Image (cartoon, rainbow, N blue to C red):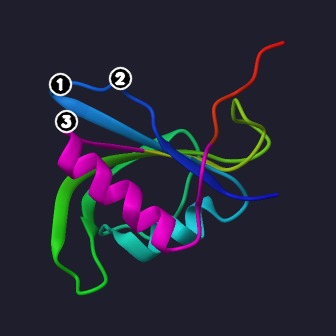
């Protein structure tokens, strides 16, 4: 199954933005773009750090929440990146996740 990613906050102007990634490789993908002092992944914790691009340029200071499978609402590994709000920053973080192996989440169909 694919590791999916999407912007979780509503479009518009806001103080924070959330990018949610879910799937087996969520933490591996995150480790390619997230710099923090602690490398240990513990479920139900939040870490402060920076999102960086492939040249180690800082994109934003963020908080990341970790939920380890199967004890998450998707039953998969989940991380939520809490960034500053605004479409530019969230889109840059989303693009980095996609570049590093995630696929765009599709809308859920309700029948």
Residue at the disc numbered 1: 14
Magenta stretch, residue numbers: 81-105
Which sits earlier in the primary sequence, circle 2 or circle 3?
Answer: 2
Position of 11 with respect to 3 (left or right) is: left
- SS assignment at label 1: loop
Q: Which mark is residue 51?
A: none
Between residue 51 and residue 37, name the one nearer to us: 51
The CA distance from mark 1 to mark 3 is: 5 Å
Q: Which residue is mark 3?
A: 85
Q: CA distance from mark 2 to mark 1?
A: 9 Å
Q: Would you call the spot at circle 1 few (<14 residues within 10 Å), some (14-19), or many (20 or more)?
A: few
Q: Is residue 69 magenta?
A: no
Tag 1–tag 3 contact (CB < 8 Å):
yes
User: Can you tell which of label 2 and label 3 is closer to the viewer?
Assistant: 2
The residue indicated by pointer 2 is 10
As measured in the structure, the alpha-carbon distance from the residue carrying label 2 to the one carrying label 3 is: 10 Å
Q: Which residue is rendered at x = 18% and y = 63% of the image? A: 59
């Amino acid at each position: 199954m694919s590791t999916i990613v999407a912007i979780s906050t509503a479009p518009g102007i806001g103080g924070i933005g959330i990018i949610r990634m879910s799937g087996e490789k969520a933490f591996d993908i995150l480790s390619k773009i997230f710099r923090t002092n602690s490398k240990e992944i513990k479920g139900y914790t939040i870490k402060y750090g920076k999102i960086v691009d492939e040249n180690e340029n800082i994109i934003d200071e963020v908080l990341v929440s970790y939920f380890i499978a199967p004890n998450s609402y998707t039953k998969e590994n989940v991380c939520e990146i809490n960034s500053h709000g605004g479409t530019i920053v969230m889109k840059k973080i989303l693009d980095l996740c996609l570049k590093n192996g995630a696929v765009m989440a599709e809308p859920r169909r309700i029948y």
